[in-house]
Image (spheres, coloured by chain):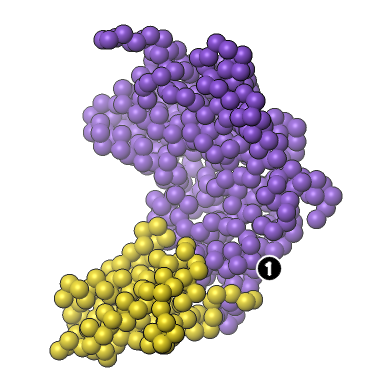
């Protein structure tokens, strides 16, 4: 391990003990000590119900939440922090849009267009919405490397398309989808564009003002923050028109026996006591990213990706899904080993303390489209080391032997 | 590399004896583990209460496939009631609740006893056995 790697890993308590080789960063990231401490500090010193209290610690808890909102807005270059709605995770953000905007906007016969590579969380809310509204769910496809053609996308759009939903980075291929021209094409048809940013926001620069995306959902826990805090970005004018998702406390201006007036966004969408400790953790995670430098994180992930892919291609019987170019993977490597089921790969890796994912990665329609039943996935984070990758590659190269193949 | 995957298990997975078509099967049932995608189709020929032949097809991890192949080794030629009795022992073994004598009755399938310490893989090991139980109880 290099001195730099030692310094990075010292920030992460779960990794610094040196036992676990964590290669499941697509599922969730490890948490820096600073984030864990800042969440604990929130509960030790500021714990009170935020947003309503008129006493000192509640005011300070509210300020912490609003600081997190401001910081998040600036991280994705939103024009205004009122466009940042706190949710539990990306899944909740996507459901929020389906149950509010979608429910109001769709009429029978309208179309929702989504990509075949979507995570189930950006697929099922739309399919169920279409069933409720007697609308039509349409898919547009990628090639076998996960590349989407703008021309095919345009052909799939129609005057009936009201909503387009697409991830800005696939959790299987690791490829970034440059959504900007897709957003423009959707707008030309009068549709709104909903982006799933769960994988993209932690790994590449996100600029909602430049892309023009209408909604963007992502999770804090994949970018060093605690589980249970997520973000839905929505354009101010859309959020203002939309009905609330959940109703109850914190989201109203007044309630009488027979009438009520909802708060303005984002509060209209944040019913009930919010996860203020989680918001404090998200703020801390974004500050951690600043302290390291997002450019440095991206650079390191690219270097590790180069090292990983150059090793993977040398192992016989291993096939990597997606691009031949390491920089297109953003640390995500989904693969198969001939004759060995992904669950067995994962089991053998686990016996060496190596954590990888096996299955369909919540993207079953994509696996059906690609004609593979299931796959294994190793995904890198900024704190992984070449030693981690070496250990993974060594075990991978021995797997067919362990499984009784005489290569 | 020292792993759970011993030679008996891998041999049944890579070179299964009973993974083939069975024409004129009397009983056929599909078993699926939706969470991991294991999938088997189990077929039996039964005559006078005796399982005279059996086969399976499908796709899944080594544990699910090898377990099913070992099960067929054990039950082909045995009476339906005996197969049910052995299945009950196997399912108890996976919970860590059998005697050494009972485990020996399972012959090679006894190598899967360590699954009792691997909660994530229990469903894989029992897929074939559950499918057989369900199929035989319908008869």
Where is the N terminus of chain B found, in terms of image quarters? Answer: bottom right
Q: Residues within 10 Å of mark 1 (few under 14, many from 20)?
A: few
Residue A181 coordinates in the image, percent (x, y): 52, 30
Q: Chain of mark 1?
A: A
Residue A294 coordinates in the image, percent (x, y): 71, 35
The foreground one among A9 and A215 is A9
Position of residue A295 relative to residue A246, above or below, is below
Q: Chain letter for purple? A: A
In the figure, residue A205 lies in which quadrant? Answer: top right
Q: Which residue is mark 1?
A: A394
The foreground one among B126 and A78 is B126
Q: Left or right: where does residue B61 sit relative to residue A201? A: left
Position of residue A124 relative to residue A96, above or below, is below
Where is the C terminus of chain B found, in terms of image quarters? Answer: bottom left
- The residue at the point 48 percent across, 30 percent down is A87
In the figure, residue A333 lies in which quadrant? Answer: bottom right
């Amino acid at each position: 391990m290099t001195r730099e790697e030692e310094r990075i890993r010292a920030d992460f308590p779960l990794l610094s003990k040196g036992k676990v080789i964590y290669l499941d960063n697509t599922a969730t990231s490890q948490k820096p000590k600073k984030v864990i401490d800042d969440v604990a500090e929130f509960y030790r010193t500021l714990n009170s119900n935020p947003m309503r209290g008129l006493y000192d610690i509640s005011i300070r808890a509210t300020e912490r939440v609003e600081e997190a909102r401001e910081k998040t807005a600036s991280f994705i270059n939103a024009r205004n922090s009122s466009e940042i709605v706190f949710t539990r995770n990306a899944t909740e953000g996507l459901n929020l849009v389906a149950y509010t905007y979608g429910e109001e906007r769709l009429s029978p016969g309208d179309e929702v267009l989504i990509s075949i590579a979507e995570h189930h969380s950006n697929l099922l809310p739309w399919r169920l919405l279409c069933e409720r509204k007697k609308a039509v769910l349409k898919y547009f496809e990628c090639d076998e490397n996960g590349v989407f053609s703008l021309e095919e996308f345009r052909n799939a759009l129609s005057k009936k398309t009201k909503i387009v939903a697409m991830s800005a980075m696939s959790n299987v291929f690791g490829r970034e989808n440059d959504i900007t021209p897709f957003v423009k094409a959707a707008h030309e048809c009068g549709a709104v564009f909903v982006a799933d940013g769960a994988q993209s926001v932690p790994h590449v620069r996100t600029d909602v003002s430049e892309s023009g995306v209408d909604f963007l959902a992502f999770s804090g826990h994949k970018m060093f923050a605690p589980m249970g805090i997520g973000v839905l970005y929505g354009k101010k004018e859309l959020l203002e028109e939309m009905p609330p998702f959940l109703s109850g406390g914190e989201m109203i201006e007044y309630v009488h026996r027979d009438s009520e007036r909802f708060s303005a966004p984002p509060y209209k969408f944040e019913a009930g006591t919010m996860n203020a400790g989680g918001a404090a953790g998200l703020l801390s995670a974004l500050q951690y990213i600043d302290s390291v430098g997002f450019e440095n994180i991206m650079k390191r992930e690219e270097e590790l990706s180069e090292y990983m892919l150059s090793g993977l291609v040398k192992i016989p019987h291993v096939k990597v899904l997606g691009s031949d170019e390491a920089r297109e993977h953003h640390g995500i490597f989904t693969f198969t080993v001939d004759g060995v089921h992904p669950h067995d790969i994962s089991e053998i890796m686990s016996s060496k303390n190596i954590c990888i994912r096996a299955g369909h990665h919540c993207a079953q329609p994509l696996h059906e489209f690609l004609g593979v039943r299931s796959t294994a996935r190793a995904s890198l984070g900024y704190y992984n080391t070449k030693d981690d990758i070496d250990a993974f590659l060594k075990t991978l190269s021995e797997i067919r032997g362990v499984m009784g193949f005489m290569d | 590399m020292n792993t759970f995957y011993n030679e008996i298990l891998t041999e049944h997975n890579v070179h299964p004896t009973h993974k083939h078509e069975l024409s004129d099967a009397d009983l056929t049932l599909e078993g699926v583990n939706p969470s991991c995608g294991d999938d088997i189709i189990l077929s039996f020929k039964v005559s006078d209460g005796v399982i005279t032949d059996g086969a399976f097809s499908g796709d899944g991890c080594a544990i699910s496939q090898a377990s099913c192949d070992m099960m067929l080794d054990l039950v082909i030629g045995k009476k339906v009631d005996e197969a049910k009795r052995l299945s009950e022992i196997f399912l108890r073994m996976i919970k860590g609740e059998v005697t050494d004598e009972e485990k020996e009755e399972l012959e090679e399938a006894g190598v899967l006893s360590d699954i009792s310490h691997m909660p994530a893989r229990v469903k894989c090991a029992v897929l074939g056995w559950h499918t057989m139980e369900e199929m035989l109880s319908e008869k």
